[in-house]
Image (cartoon, rainbow, N blue to C red):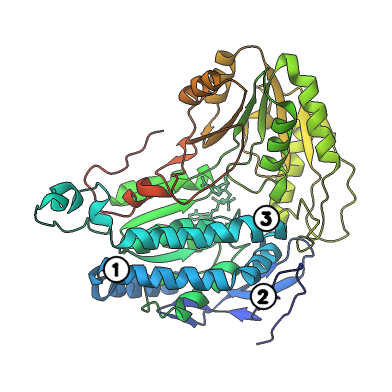
Amino acid sequence: MTGLEYGAAAGSSPARLRGSYGLFIGGSFVPGTAVFKTVSPATEEVLAEVTHGTTEDVDRAVAVARQAYERVWSVLPGRERARYLLRIARLLRDRAPELAVVESLDSGKPIRQTRDVDLPLVTAHFFYHAGWADKLAYAGFGGAGSSGAGSGGAAAAPPRPLGVVGQVIGWSSPLLMLAWKIAPALACGNTVVLKPAESTPLTALAFAEICAEAGLPPGVVNIVTGDGQTGQLVAGHPGIDKVAFTGSPEVGKEIAKSAALWGKRFTLELGGTSANIVCADADIEAAAQGIVEGVFIRQGHACCASSRVFVAQEVHDDLVAAVRERMSALRSGDPLDEATDIGAVNSRGQLDKITELARSAEADGAVRLSTPHEPPDRGFWFPPTMFAGVSQEQRIAREELCWPVLTVSSFAAPDEVVDRTNAARYGLSAGVWTRQGALSGWLAARLRAGVVWVNSFGGLDPAVPFGGFQESGFGREGGRHGLEAYLDLPGAWTPDV
Ligand code: NDP
């Protein structure tokens, strides 16, 4: 195996990449029969060879996860599970500068985003869930806390875990999505088989190294890399007790059907395309900054990217001008450069999709406002783009935008914008910009979105549940609500679509 060393942004460590990776099953890397290459979307350079998990590999991973569940993890006291989670959190913190570089290389995201936002959140998720591992009986799901133990009642057992969880995640925020899935699953006493996206497997594999370094009992976490077929094998495996999925609504629906058929629990974190609503009295400069940060920074690769802007018609032109001014100052380029705001689009497939959708928007009559952009010769690049004059009937207004693209349309009255926002297929998150507390409360109460930010956009915290309505999926990740998804509770999450 040959090692690759990359120079990184100031303050970051060089990435320690192996030339090739096996599958992480039963506590160590095991070779598989087929490999694929993961490339840097900024340069198309091959970063590493990664193993393609087959039916036999997934069978093996599920079998060792079952053994680890029954013999070790589900019978370990919560305070012991907490110690492992704390160890993982500390190792993540220690290796954060290096992991940020790997994430930027593999996903195309700018280093400022991976290092200053993603990695701190990843670590925080493990610290936060370590705190829950020995307190599940007090979380209000039944157990000591609800049986009056604090006032002298007998302590009841904490709620039971579900068993072996199959987890499949996408390419936007790969390590953060892994943390959202693995930290609560382990805190609640489950074992996991996780499949990262084909285009962004490297930080999941680095996480596997961390599990081994933390001395996590073999089989508690298994990482099986591969493509959509491997995802299907994990999500549809008869030996798992629950599926947790982050990805597109199309695949989410397939998973929901098959899980329902097998009577398995499932939670789905699906697509977004969030609305950002700018009212007539809003601070326009602040709103423009929030919009630009909400969609362009990390090149729109986020389920909660604020890609649909609704602006009160009296301030439409002012807002468009303020957003354009900021767009023209954005720098796109090398994800490892400190000065980069917008990195590379994650894969050629994603670039093709947005290129085609942008053409169709122009053909439908939307006005395209892009900033001057000279992409490097290699890699997958798309300029920051705003489409103005967008109407609800146009494709660009209806489809998910997971790229550096936003649409702007105006509204006349608050109830109109509520109706238009709620008419979307998605309901993951929304932003509201107004100086009136009463109006923000009125809007937030009516928007069918899992999270509504007021005069800000995109803040995340492990203690705050995140998840969607409608085609954005169901179930919550984070906070006390997120634990429900990994505990065997009667009447727990049922779809609200
Ligand atoms: P996909 O649904 O294409 O893929 C998601 C994962 O599922 C990948 O690991 C993929 O493998 C795998 N997969 C593909 N086909 C199947 C299948 N038939 N059965 C099981 N697994 C399968 O989504 P994207 O990778 O395009 O992810 C982007 C989507 O994720 C966007 O819609 C985005 O909004 C959403 N997202 C939602 C979040 C939330 O919290 N709600 C957070 C982040 C993203 P492979 O990579 O090899 O194709």
- Nearer-the-camera pick, 484 or 440: 440
Q: Is residue 182 above or below residue 409?
A: below
Q: Nearer the viewer, mark 3 or mark 1?
A: 1
Q: Residue furthest bottom?
A: 1
For the point 56% across and 24% down, the residue is 421
Q: Helix, strand or loop at disc 1? A: helix
| Amino acid at dot 1 | Arg
| Amino acid at dot 2 | Ala
- Nearer-the-camera pick, 396 or 82: 82
State the image coordinates of residue 142 (x, y, percent, origin top left).
19, 49
- Nearer-the-camera pick, 111 or 305: 111
State the image coordinates of residue 122 (x, y, percent, origin top left).
53, 60
| Amino acid at dot 3 | Gln
Q: Is residue 150 left or right of residue 93?
A: left
Q: Helix, strand or loop at disc 3? A: helix
The disc, 2 or 1, on the residue closer to the chain's N-terminal end is: 2
* Res 48 label: 2
- Nearer-the-camera pick, 54 or 285: 285
Q: Which residue is mark 1?
A: 79
Q: Which residue is mark 3?
A: 113
Asked if the beta carbon under badge 2 is closer than 8 A to the nearest atom of ligand 1, the reply is no
Quarter placement of the N terminus: bottom right
State the image coordinates of residue 185 (x, y, percent, origin top left).
37, 60
Q: Is residue 359 left or right of residue 13?
A: right
For the point 67% across and 75% down, the residue is 48
For the point 45% across and 52% down, the residue is 245
Question: In which image quadrant can residue 38 be found?
Answer: bottom right
